[in-house]
Image (tube, rainbow, N blue to C red):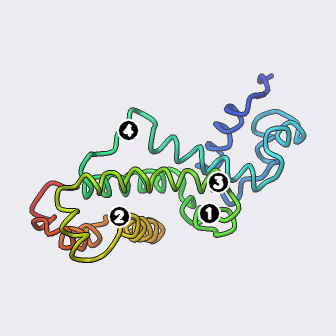
Amino acid sequence: MNRPITSKEALLTTARALTAQDGLLKLTVRKLAGAAGVSIGTVYNYFPSKEALIEAVIRSVWLQVFHGQNQQQPQAFLPALAWVYSRMQAAQARYPDLMAAHDHRTIMATSPGLQAMHAHIQAALVRTLEADPHWPATAAKTGLSPDQVVHFALTHLKYAASDHRADCRDLLAILAALLEKEDPHASSLY
């Protein structure tokens, strides 16, 4: 007989495995309880609703994707965006319906944890953009704030990942032109 799983992290590990196998949108409390060898009530002790379970799985996946295996964001803005996109693609490859589930407005609108995680990613990219030596001239010329540019970039990246685009070269080319950098296709941004 298998030893039942009883910790929240172990339940999340099992939930990620089920999500990779069947998709996030098919994850249920009952399916998780069965795979973990615990009662449905045990799952509800850690996740008070299916929505809480889905939120925890999404958060767990993104933490694993962005911080697992010694992942480090590049220090320059355009390579950092390319890196974020590569991490989104890695998540999409492992969890095929992740972007569709993540894009569900109800989850994002009602989840302080997911909102905080998104704010963390945005803040890191804003700091990276502000450190770019081309940024002060771009800001003066366009009147855009770093938050506006990063919000635009993240919105595009999420759409591109949901659309299963191979890369984000179009976004990088637009931002390279905005920042008056050399052609991104001629350098090793990717």
In the figure, 156 relative to 113: above or below? below
Q: Is residue 46 left or right of residue 107?
A: right
Identify the amino acid type marked 2: Pro
Numbered disc 3: secondary structure = helix
Distance between the alpha carbons at the discs numbered 4 and 3: 26 Å
Circle 4: is it few (<14), some (14-19), or many (20+) Cα within 10 Å?
few
Q: Are marks 2 and 3 in contact (CB under 8 Å)?
A: no
Closer mark to the observer between disc 2 and disc 1: 2
Closer mark to the observer between disc 3 and disc 1: 1
Distance between the alpha carbons at the discs numbered 2 and 3: 39 Å
Residue 80 screen position, x and y as percent: 30, 52
Considering the image in quadrants, where does the C terminus appear? bottom left
Identify the amino acid type marked 4: Gln
Distance between the alpha carbons at the discs numbered 3 and 1: 13 Å
Residue 89 screen position, x and y as percent: 41, 56
Numbered disc 4: secondary structure = loop
Distance between the alpha carbons at the discs numbered 2 and 1: 28 Å
- Say which label, 1 or 4, has the lower sequence index: 4
Can you identify the residue that label 2 sits on? 146
Can you identify the residue that label 1 sits on? 101
Closer mark to the observer between disc 4 and disc 3: 4
Distance between the alpha carbons at the discs numbered 2 and 4: 24 Å
Residue 147, by quadrant, is: bottom left
User: Going 18% across and 73% down the picture, which residue do you hit?
Assistant: 177
Identify the amino acid type marked 3: Asp
Can you identify the residue that label 4 sits on? 71
In the figure, 142 relative to 38: above or below? below
Considering every residue shown, the one lying at the far front of the view is 140
User: Going 31% across and 64% down the picture, which residue do you hit?
Assistant: 167
